[in-house]
Amino acid sequence: MGSHPLEGNSMAALNVGIIGQGRSGRDIHGNYLVTDPEYFRIAAVVDPLEDRRQRAVAEYKCDAYADYHALFQRKDLDLVVNATPSHLHVPITREFLDAGYNVLCEKPLAKRAAEVDELIAAAERSGKVLAIFQQSRFAPYFLKMQEVIASGVLGRIVQISSFWNGYGRRWDWQTLQKYNGGSLLNTGPHPLDQALELFGEDMPEVFCRMDRANSYGDAEDHVKLILSGEGHPLIDIEISSCCGYPGTTYNVYGTRGGLRGTASGLEWKYFLPEEAPEQRLTEEPLCQPDGTPAYCSEQLPWRTESWQASEADGGAFTTAVRGLYRMLYRTLTTGAPLEVTPQQVRRQIAVIEECHRQNPGIY
């Protein structure tokens, strides 16, 4: 679809249709796209609520429709953004792929891996792009953390703990299972996408426990999830709405140091083996110089470094959104491969499906 050729026209603004003008469709996608007119133009929006349609027309200077089927009459859309409620992601995305449109679907892409397979097959049949809005992959703090880990200064990574916690009660549609609600499907795609990147390419072993603490619906709002596997770091993820003392987002354990931090900043420390005191294993009792018993301890020559996020480009969230949209622009205009693929997201959904299987009393 599209009224202008995409191939070889890398500076043509792409026409975008957004389905949904809620917190995601307006406050994330709409708010970002209007700041990037060189790359994107909002041509149409869909929302069943009249006041939201009127607001979109005023804010974007676009067409507005009450029913998404009206978009099938338009041949000028280069991309359709599916920002509908979660339980509609699969059927509506499939409809647009089958009709020959490129689609960017909000997270969670699906509830079951088999549904992702259906969407991948639909994209392959139509020859169109299926992208998923996993913008946390492009968050500056995550990119920096990957860089530090890949440098090897922390040694072998033993464990990565990721905390997406806070305290709050919730009573909207995202607390209901029938709408694919719950913390794992709502918040979980962000830490899980990052975690699986850090874990490696294999499918991990999954252990998960869920609870309903402060939710007014029937879906979980407390998740403890552990990913493990031979030759991979153990990854410990918490997603909770009943944590009164939230702290750091990431804590990385390595054989020569560690890293901790949040979206606003990271710090890490490590030692170089050639600078560390020489030690050897001993079975003899350890003693102080005066002969009294000693604890096994040493003063390691720690090196410390840090990184602070820049607010110059609109903050960490906007930078991550820009990273995903610019990646998608390259894919649609030059054929560059997606950096977040449906196959990668399928593994995420398979983990979520296994978590639900392990918690039949909650899900």
Image (cartoon, grey):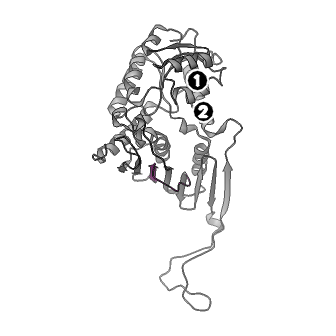
Residue 217, numbered circle:
none
Residue 198 appears in the rendering: yes
Among the two numbered marks 1 and 2 on one chain, the one whose residue lies closer to the N terminus: 2
Q: Where in the figure is residue 57, as x and y percent of width and height?
A: 58, 15
Q: Give me the residue at 53% from left, 19% from top.
A: 51
Q: Which residue, given by chain and number where applicable, does mark 2 sit on?
A: 323
Considering every residue shown, the one lying at the far left of the view is 360
Q: Amino acid at mark 2?
A: Gly
Q: Is residue 163 above or below residue 302?
A: above
Out of 9 and 137, give the one closest to the viewer: 137
Q: Which mark is residue 329?
A: 1
Count of all numbered marks drawn on residues in the image: 2
Q: Nearer the viewer, residue 121 or 134?
A: 134
Q: Quadrant of residue 268?
A: bottom right
- Mark 1 and 2 residues: CB-CB less than 8 Å, in contact? no
Instruction: Rate crowding at label 1 as few (under 14), some (14 to 19) or many (20 or more) other CA atoms within 10 Å.
Output: many
Q: Is residue 265 magenta?
A: no
Residue 154 percent coordinates (x, y): 58, 57
Magenta span of residues = 232-248
Percent position (x, y) of residue 324? 57, 31
Residue 15, can we see it? no
Q: What amino acid is at disc 1?
A: Tyr
Q: Residue at x 46, y 43 (%)?
A: 192
* Residue 98 position by quadrant: top left
What kind of element bears circle 1? helix
> Residue at the spot x=48%, y=23% of the render?
20
Coordinates of residue 87 in the picture (x, y in percent): 38, 29
Secondary structure beneath dot 2 equals helix
